[in-house]
Amino acid sequence: LGEAARRHGAVLLHRDPQPVVAVREGRGVEREGRALHARPARLPLAGRTTFRAVRHLAESGIRARFYATMSGAIPKRIVSLCPSITEALFDMGAGGRVVGVTEYCVHPADAVADVTKVGGSKLPDLAALFGLEPDLVVMNEEENRVEDFEEIESRGIPVLNTFPKKVIDAAHMVRDIGRAVGCEAESERIAGEIEAAVARALAANAGRVRLRAACLIWMRPFMALNSDTFISDMMSIAG
């Protein structure tokens, strides 16, 4: 599928509060607390008029809600609580404004080495996070807990959550993040690379006999992916 699609999509991402909020149908999975789920909120979007709209992503069927309030400010102190989002922020040129990341955010290695760590994605150090005085926190539905989202939101800090459930959604996600942090041109470039990688993979496998495969993600008991997941879609595109 290409490096761009792998790096920017292989980590479950959700949109929920803020300029973009993709909402998954149904409840989140219990895992060390409640998984993040749909919750409308507000996020300042630079240079855009106030709006509130609902759209459907035809490519994935994910419902996306957009809530925004006009402030004219581009975030200057960003905290990322998901490794793939951290990498995307640096790739699109917002890395200089990233002031906090998780212990699992290891790429780009040289760039994140000196960025303040705020614990893990499941158990972030919220005291350390608040001490950084962020004006945007980027989260992920399955990587992060709803309890932490609620606590961050209660402090009046804008939060952007992401959740691509199909490979092509990674492109939508990158555009959403780019719009939120004022890096639309670079995010469009990255999104285009992801879309091109998907198109190449689909073309390469057109007409081929499809393989039957299973992806096990846990033992005792054995657990496998269902069809409504990012990895399942990636495997399907790959043939």
Image: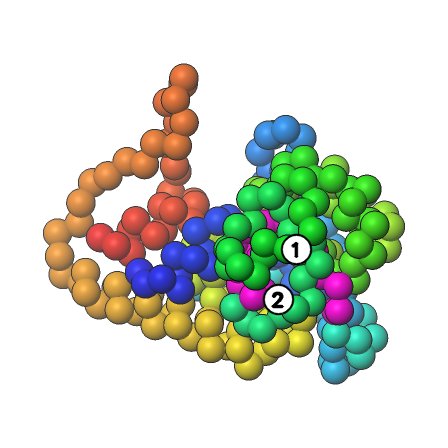
Residue 81 located left or right of residue 202:
right
Q: Work out which residue is located at the far right of the displayed protein and give it.
A: 155
Q: Residue at x 34, y 32 (%)?
A: 216
Classify the position of the N terminus by image quarter: bottom left
As rendered, which of 21 and 57 lies closer to the eye?
A: 21
Q: Position of residue 223 (x, y in %)?
A: 39, 27
Q: Position of residue 101 (x, y in %)?
A: 65, 51
Does residue 154 show up magenta in the picture?
no
Amino acid at the residue labelled 2? Gly
Q: Is residue 161 above or below residue 126?
A: below
Q: Residue at x 38, y 36 (%)?
A: 225
Q: Is residue 90 above or below residue 130?
A: below
Q: Dot 2, crowdedness within 10 Å: few (<14), some or many (≥20)?
A: some
Residue picked out by circle 1:
115
Looking at the rendering, the stretch of residues picked out in magenta corresponds to 75-90
Q: Work out which residue is located at the far top of the displayed protein and give it.
A: 220
Q: Is residue 167 above or below residue 49?
A: above
Q: Which mark is residue 177?
A: none
As measured in the structure, the alpha-carbon distance from the residue carrying label 2 to the one carrying label 1 is: 10 Å
Q: Residue at x 43, y 57 (%)?
A: 7
Amino acid at the residue labelled 1? Val
Residue picked out by circle 2:
95
Q: Classify mark 1: helix, strand or loop.
A: loop
Residue 23 visible (yes or no): no
Q: Position of residue 125 (x, y in %)?
A: 74, 39
Q: Residue at x 30, y 49 (%)?
A: 235
Q: Dot 1, crowdedness within 10 Å: few (<14), some or many (≥20)?
A: some
